[in-house]
Image: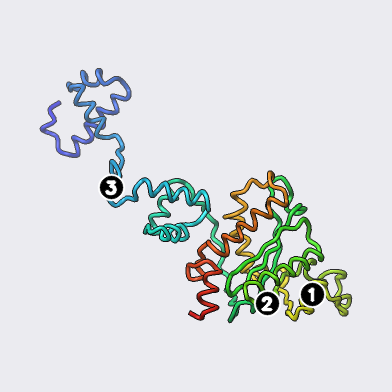
Amino acid sequence: MNNKYLNERQLIQYRKRVLRDCESYTVAKAARIYGLHRSTIYEWKKSVKPKKTGPKGRVFWQTNEKLEKEIVRIRKVTNYGPKRIKQELETIGVKVGEKAIRGILNRERLVKNHKKKRVRKKQKFYAPYPGYRIQIDTKAVPDPETDLRSAERYQFTSIDIASRIRFCWIYDELSNANSIDFLNKVLRFYEEIGIGVECVQTDNHMTFTNLYVGGRKKKEHQYLRLHPFTKRCLKNGIAHILSRPGTPRHNCFVERSHRTDEEEFYRLLDLPSLNNQKLQLELQKWMFRYNFLRLHSSCNNMPPIKNYQTVWTTGA
């Protein structure tokens, strides 16, 4: 067939018919039928193959391979997000944008897609100075071999909502004695830093209050017995307030710090191989890193201790 008498549309249809017959027969037989050379058919088949749209190699504006490996290493070791990885790189004099870091993490499939949560009305907390309010809560150690409903180890946590300075300790059970012992450790810890605790906020667990224990009717709570934890707070001249029942967001600072523990500390540990003593040591190392080394966006991109010394102590 003479192709010079075909317009562009007819030529495209003609080539499609030839290639379709190549699939039904062979290239050699289709070449004999249509009077074409086999190399011509092979060129047509090559032209319709899907091609990559991106560059053939690394382009000049792409992050160099050595830096990409460093970003992946930081992500695997610390489980940081793009913003915090950028801050870590800036401490060693390397500047990379958050968008570039996010692209690298996406390519390496190191980003977990989170479900969108409904927007809640934010509650503002007022803390004019460190020690104005300390939030205390407990967390079951996420050991994969035990059920969290009957965990064998618990983490008691306190955080100052003004300076974000934290203190944690591991106990083998939730009890009044352990809550009082932890309170004594917390007061001693903040006193050594120079923070005087004025108020302690907890949830309504029976480790901290008797308000919802011992009866179901309102008249059974008419004469409330003070919890030993509350008594110890009052003995030290500290107010003890409770969050609203079933509302963990009112304890938002300590709850958010527990999520940080989950992502950047417990996820990187082999918990079944650690007894309570070793886990206690690892937790205190993590607390040192959290308070003295880890950068916090809410602390002007400084560690909490440094932010406390520069902002709250000097008033800078």
Instruction: Write down the quadrant of residue 27 in the picture.
Output: top left
Q: Nearer the viewer, residue 74 or 247?
A: 74
SS for callout 3: loop
The kind of residue tagged 2 is: Val
Q: Which mark is residue 232?
A: 1
Instruction: Write down the quadrant of residue 141 in the picture.
Output: bottom right
Neighbour class for label 3 at 10 Å: few (<14), some, many (≥20)? few
Q: Position of residue 218 (x, y in %)?
A: 85, 76
Q: Position of residue 13 (x, y in %)?
A: 23, 34
The kind of residue tagged 1 is: Arg
Q: Which numbered disc, 3 or 1, marks the residue closer to the eye?
A: 1
What quarter of the picture does the N terminus occupy?
A: top left
Seen in the picture, residue 59 relative to 311 is either above or below; the reply is above
Q: Which residue is mark 2?
A: 197
Q: Nearer the viewer, residue 186 or 151?
A: 186
Instruction: Write down the quadrant of residue 10 in the picture.
Output: top left
* Residue 66 shown left or right of residue 18 in the figure: right
Neighbour class for label 2 at 10 Å: few (<14), some, many (≥20)? many
CB within 8 Å, label 3 to label 2: no
